[in-house]
């Protein structure tokens, strides 16, 4: 553990090293959070990497290094490997408690889409619904004439920069609205819902390109609450967490009036995240509607993806309902600072890698992690 005191960690630095090695497992102490109860007995077991420890991985320098070295050198916090529904290998950094919920950032988006699938199956909302028909306050914003389907597929046209390091512009104001950045008395931010309804429309038509913007999923979380009449945390608990048999409570960050950060606010253990991956591998396993999961596995519009702002990630990929189709047969959910959920149906493997990488996005490191995940999944 790097030497620092809890008092050193603030809203201004909690997502940076060395503080993130602690705060990513204790986000509920930094940002107001709801608890998503598991109702299960805490797990105490931990499995070693075993023979995977020395698996050669092509690292950042394109040199082969062992898996354990790769994990250590890339600020990894946890790795869980599950095959055919059973956890077969685990690795944790010295500072990482396997039983403590860890921030999963934008993997939260993928989980939000699972809840959307339940409500759509129940007839509470439709993909063709206009966003403003459910959330009238969105009229006049970018969301005023967009649909739920465009929202879930990240094809709403926004005039908004996804700039994670911004401290003066719209993204900083967005993070202040969600209580993730320190407030500025001279320019106070509104609550999250109010902020979302002020984002202007971009220049291109809705549905024409894949444009990754986190506010879309926060809007989706609000729509789910309105359609169901229940809080987002309660929806996750009722429709996913308890039916899944999760062993640990999850946490969800909230703004000052209780709006959920559906796009990135969830924390959970690596083991429980792997269980979500296994449920998706098994086409919902009776928890999430099978047809909804099948649609996710089918992937999205490849042309829309190819012209979008994440095409560098998977050259043959696509995006649908907040999940990444990799183009290699695997499905992925991804969060900044190095959070990965990887599902390979060919080898019946689910892999979770959690991290506290220094930067929110690192293209070269992301591709190195993809190579690592593919190598681990390929081991018989």
Image (cartoon, rainbow, N blue to C red):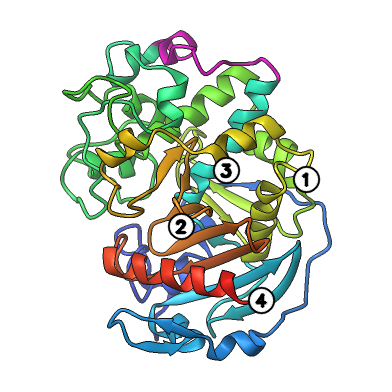
Magenta region: 122-136
Closer to the camera, 275 or 186? 275
Q: How far apart, in angstroms, are the residues tagged by discs 4 and 2? A: 41 Å
| Residue ID at (42%, 17%) | 147
Q: Is residue 310 above or below residue 369?
A: above
Q: Earlier in the sequence, mark 1 or mark 2?
A: 2
| Residue ID at (72%, 79%) | 46
Q: Earlier in the sequence, mark 4 or mark 2?
A: 2
Res 284 label? none
Residue at mark 3: 111
Q: Is residue 356 visible?
A: no
Q: Is residue 65 above or below residue 212?
A: below
| Residue ID at (65%, 48%) | 35
| Residue ID at (40%, 24%) | 150
Q: Nearer the viewer, mark 1 or mark 2?
A: 1
Closer to the camera, 33 or 25? 25
Residue at mark 2: 30
Identify the element where label 2 is drawn.
helix
């Amino acid at each position: 553990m790097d030497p620092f005191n809890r008092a050193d960690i603030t809203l201004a630095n909690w997502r940076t090293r060395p503080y993130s090695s602690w705060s990513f497992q204790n986000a509920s102490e930094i940002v107001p959070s709801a608890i998503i109860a598991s109702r299960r007995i805490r797990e105490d077991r931990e499995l070693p990497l075993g023979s995977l420890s020395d698996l050669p991985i092509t690292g950042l320098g394109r040199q082969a290094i062992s898996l354990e070295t790769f994990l250590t050198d890339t600020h990894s916090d946890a790795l869980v490997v599950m095959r055919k529904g059973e956890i077969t290998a685990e690795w944790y950094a010295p500072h990482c408690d396997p039983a403590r919920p860890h921030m999963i950032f934008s993997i939260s988006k993928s989980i939000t889409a699972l809840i959307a699938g339940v409500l759509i199956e129940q007839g509470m909302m439709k993909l063709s619904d206009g966003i403003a028909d459910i959330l009238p306050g969105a009229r006049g914003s970018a969301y005023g004439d967009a649909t739920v389907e465009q929202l879930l597929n990240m094809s709403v046209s926004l005039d908004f920069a996804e700039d994670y390091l911004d401290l003066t512009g719209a993204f900083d104001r967005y993070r202040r609205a969600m209580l993730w950045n320190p407030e500025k008395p001279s320019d106070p931010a509104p609550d999250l819902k109010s902020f979302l309804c002020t984002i202007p429309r971009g220049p291109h038509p809705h549905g024409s390109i894949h444009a990754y913007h986190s506010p879309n999923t926060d809007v989706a979380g609000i729509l789910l609450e309105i359609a169901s009449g229940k809080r987002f945390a309660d929806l996750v608990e009722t429709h996913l967490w308890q039916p899944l048999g999760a062993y640990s409570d999850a946490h969800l960050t909230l703004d000052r009036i209780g709006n959920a950060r559906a796009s990135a606010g969830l924390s959970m253990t690596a083991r429980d995240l792997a269980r979500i991956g296994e449920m998706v591998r098994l086409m919902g396993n009776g928890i999430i509607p099978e047809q909804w999961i099948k649609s996710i596995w089918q992937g999205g519009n490849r042309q829309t993806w190819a012209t979008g702002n994440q095409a560098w990630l998977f050259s043959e990929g696509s995006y649908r309902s907040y999940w990444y189709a990799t183009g290699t047969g695997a499905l992925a959910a991804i969060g900044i600072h190095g959070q990965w959920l990887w599902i390979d149906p060919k080898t019946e493997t689910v892999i979770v890698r959690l991290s506290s990488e220094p930067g929110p996005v690192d293209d070269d490191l992301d591709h190195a992690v993809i190579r690592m995940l593919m190598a681990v999944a390929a081991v018989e």
